[in-house]
């Protein structure tokens, strides 16, 4: 089986890599994080002009028509620069949900705006009591004369402050923990009744707690059939986990490279510490951890291709692969991050060195859409369901 990226994918990777190398150095990133909005709108416009925002979308909406492999190629390189612009929240999650939606009017309206950079979006799904269970939703969407009224609170809405539009998961029927009865609505971020309280996350990005107080929406703002929103989420989740894992892989590979380079220049007892056998063993361990993560990522991509051809056969294997991948990313991300800090010594945890920033982003990815224990449990349930 060929695990090489195609010529087009290599071109996309090289394009992102050049941007990170030439225009997105560590000092530039820190200035962006310290700015009021926390993102660089000029860079976002550049992403649109370079076609990065169009990668996963169908050609009929003006997209590149790319697959999850193309998306992974972009995400791995963005991870190497720990880019804070909202590619994950807008393109991968918000855009992915739109692509899987059945409301053609919404898709035709919003996807072209994502592609040209004029629409930033986010997915408001987590609630204070939810932890990692997306279906644990108390926010309600009550039927009224002219549509629905949304009431409730969403927390940790990634890049909620900069979002123009929100996809909101709200319960239209059923109990708080039921998968059936959840609906997805498109809501303008400045709609009456929407209040946003934003804050910085530890990885330098931003998140928001958003309150919905009698926010009125119409049936035309539903992404799909009322009460069947989890079907859309389930369809998109494997691609989201693959994309996040690709970003983590880019970070892990960068941490390894930076640490190896550091050991060649840091001297102890008159010799580079790279010559110490104990450190060599530790760096081999982190290299192997990175390679094993890459192997699982490629397996997930293979299973995604199988599922696209025959969902009845490939979907179960895809779910097992992405759960195993996400658990592995959490395990090995922790190992690589800790070793990078320890080998650098005290300076490794200072804000003035990029090591700590990479590790913080890894830690955030590790708990996004479920931590290692959560995905290990899901993997076990799928693997032993017939016993």
Image: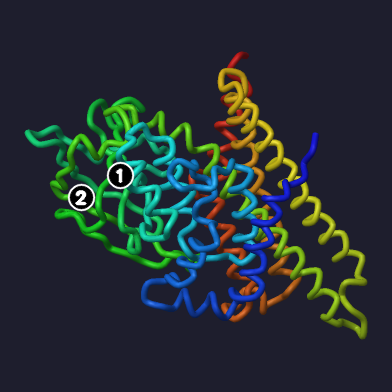
Which residue bears the numbered disc 1? 168
Q: Residue at x 54, y 40 (%)?
A: 239
Residue 288 shown left or right of residue 239 in the figure: right
Quarter of the C terminus within the rendering: top right
* Res 267 quadrant in image: bottom right
In screen coordinates, is 279 left or right of 331? right
Upstream in sequence: badge 2 or badge 1: 1
In the image, residue 28 sits, relative to residue 84, either above or below, namely below
For residue 180, what is the image quadrant?
top left
Residue drawn at x 33%, y 30% is: 177
Q: Relative to residue 312, is residue 39 depicted above or below?
A: below
Q: Are marks 2 and 1 in contact (CB under 8 Å)?
A: yes
Given residues 163 and 207, the one toward you in this image is 163
Residue 127 seen in render: no
Q: Secondary structure at mark 2?
A: strand
Camera-side residue of 385 and 241:
241
Say which residue appears at 37% left-offset and 60% top-offset: 118
Neighbor class of circle 1 (other Cα within 10 Å; few <14, some 14-19, many 20+) is: many
Residue 376: percent from the left, percent from the top?
Answer: 60, 36
Q: Is residue 127 left or right of residue 194?
A: right
Location of residue 14 with respect to 312 vertically, above or below: below
Q: CA distance from mark 2 to mark 1?
A: 10 Å
- Quarter of the image where the N terminus is located: top right
Q: Residue at x 50, y 65 (%)?
A: 84
Which residue in the rendered view is the most extreme toward the bottom? 270
Residue identifier under label 2: 212
Q: Position of residue 350 (x, y in %)?
A: 60, 78
């Amino acid at each position: 089986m060929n695990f090489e990226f195609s010529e087009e994918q290599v071109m996309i990777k090289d394009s992102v890599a050049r941007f990170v190398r030439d225009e997105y150095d560590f000092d530039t990133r820190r200035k962006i994080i310290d700015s009021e909005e926390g993102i660089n709108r000029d860079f976002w416009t550049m992403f649109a002009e370079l076609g990065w925002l169009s990668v996963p979308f169908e050609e009929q909406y003006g997209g590149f028509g790319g697959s999850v492999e193309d998306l992974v190629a972009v995400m791995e390189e963005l991870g190497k620069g720990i880019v804070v612009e909202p590619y994950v929240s807008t393109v991968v999650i918000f855009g992915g949900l739109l692509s899987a939606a059945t409301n053609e009017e919404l898709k035709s309206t919003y996807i072209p705006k994502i592609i040209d950079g004029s629409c930033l979006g986010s997915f408001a799904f987590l609630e204070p009591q939810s932890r990692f269970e997306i279906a644990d939703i108390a926010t309600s969407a009550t039927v009224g004369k002219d549509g629905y009224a949304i009431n409730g609170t969403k927390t940790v809405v990634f890049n909620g402050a900069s979002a123009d539009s929100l996809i909101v998961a709200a319960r239209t029927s059923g109990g708080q923990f039921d998968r059936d009865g959840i609906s997805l609505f498109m809501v303008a971020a400045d709609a009456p009744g929407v209040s946003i309280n934003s804050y910085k996350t530890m990885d330098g990005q931003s998140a928001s707690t958003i309150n919905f107080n009698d926010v009125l929406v119409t049936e035309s703002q539903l992404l799909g059939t009322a009460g069947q929103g989890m079907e859309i989420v389930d369809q998109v989740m494997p691609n989201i986990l693959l994309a996040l894992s690709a970003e983590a892989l880019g970070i892990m590979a960068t941490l390894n490279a930076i640490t190896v380079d550091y050991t060649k220049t840091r001297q102890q007892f008159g010799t580079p510490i790279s010559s110490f056998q104990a450190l060599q063993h530790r760096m081999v361990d982190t290299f192997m951890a990175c390679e094993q993560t890459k192997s699982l990522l490629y397996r997930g991509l293979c299973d995604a291709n199988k599922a696209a051809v025959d969902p009845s056969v490939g979907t179960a294997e895809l779910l097992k692969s992405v759960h195993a991948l996400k658990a592995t990313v959490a395990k090995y991300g922790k190992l690589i991050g800790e070793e990078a800090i320890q080998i650098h010594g005290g300076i490794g945890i200072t804000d003035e060195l990029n090591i700590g920033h990479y590790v913080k982003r890894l830690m955030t990815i590790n708990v996004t859409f479920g931590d290692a224990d959560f995905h290990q449990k899901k993997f076990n349930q799928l693997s032993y369901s017939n016993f």
